[in-house]
Image (cartoon, rainbow, N blue to C red):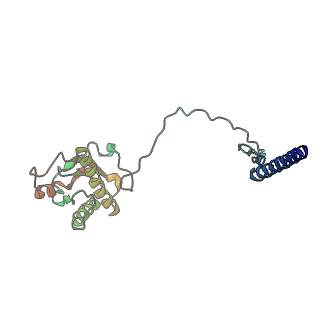
Amino acid sequence: MKREIFRNVVLVGLVLAVGATGCRGKRLSRGVTPIPPPTVVQAPPEPAPAGPITTAPTPGPVVQPGPTAPPDTGPKTTTLPDPTGGTPTASLEEFEGMLMDTNQFSAQTVYFDFDRSAVKPTETAKVDAVASFLKEKPDNKLLIDGHCDERGTEEYNRSLGERRALSVREYLTRAGIGDTRIRTRTWGEDRPADTNHTDEAWAKNRRGEFYLLLPKK
């Protein structure tokens, strides 16, 4: 009886052990999450490096080199235009040896506005009188001097005096006096008619003066 009871106890223990082991195995299998295999991402292929695009040249006409010109070693001359746009100034040789009359046209002195070289309408009658005289004396010639007041640089005033003399000369040529009968000079501010430093003095110094040139007898 004791052996049979012992054997039954052993069998019950074995059954309980096996059941416990099976239950533990099931619980472990349910609580374990399998690790998925790593996903391999394929990188896109790298683009080929950009480089210059070359094309075959288009064939064109072949230009043969022409003969090389010899170097120019001779003198070069340039014709300077007249500042007034008219005819060239008469040569100085045509006026050498002539006599100067400083009084004939003293009443015909032309006056200019400040920093201007155009002949004013109020002064044209004086220039017309000079032109009328010269038309009656074809052997006489004329010298025109341009002057400025003291304002401005010396260089600028010399240029302005020249423009004033040339402006009067151009008026005379349009009135019918040949350009070969007229010479011009500029004194800038060097010969003032009035040495005072006032508006009245400056107005007198902005002028163009005429000198009659007579042939020697």
Q: Which of 154 and 46 is in front in this view?
A: 46
Q: Is residue 142 above or below residue 63?
A: below
Q: Which picture quadrant has residue 51?
A: top right
Q: Which of 60 and 209 is in front in this view?
A: 60
Q: Position of residue 185 (x, y in %)?
A: 26, 48
Q: Where is residue 176 in the image (x, y as percent from the top left)?
A: 34, 62
Q: Where is residue 64 in the image (x, y as percent from the top left)?
A: 73, 39
Q: Who's the residue at 13% across and 52% down the image?
A: 193
**Residue sitting at the far front:** 1
Q: In this view, does 111 lie above or below 43?
A: below
**Residue sitting at the far left:** 196
Q: Who's the residue at 30% across and 57% down the image?
A: 167
Q: Who's the residue at 35% across and 49% down the image?
A: 90
- Answer with left or right where residue 199 lies relative to residue 146: left
Q: Which picture quadrant has residue 3?
A: top right
Q: Which of 167 and 158 is in front in this view?
A: 158
Q: Which of 172 and 202 is in front in this view?
A: 202
Q: Where is residue 179 in the image (x, y as percent from the top left)?
A: 35, 54
- Answer with left or right where residue 18 lies relative to residue 133: right
Q: Is residue 140 visible?
A: no
Q: Can residue 123 be seen in this view?
A: yes
Query: How many discs appear?
Result: 0
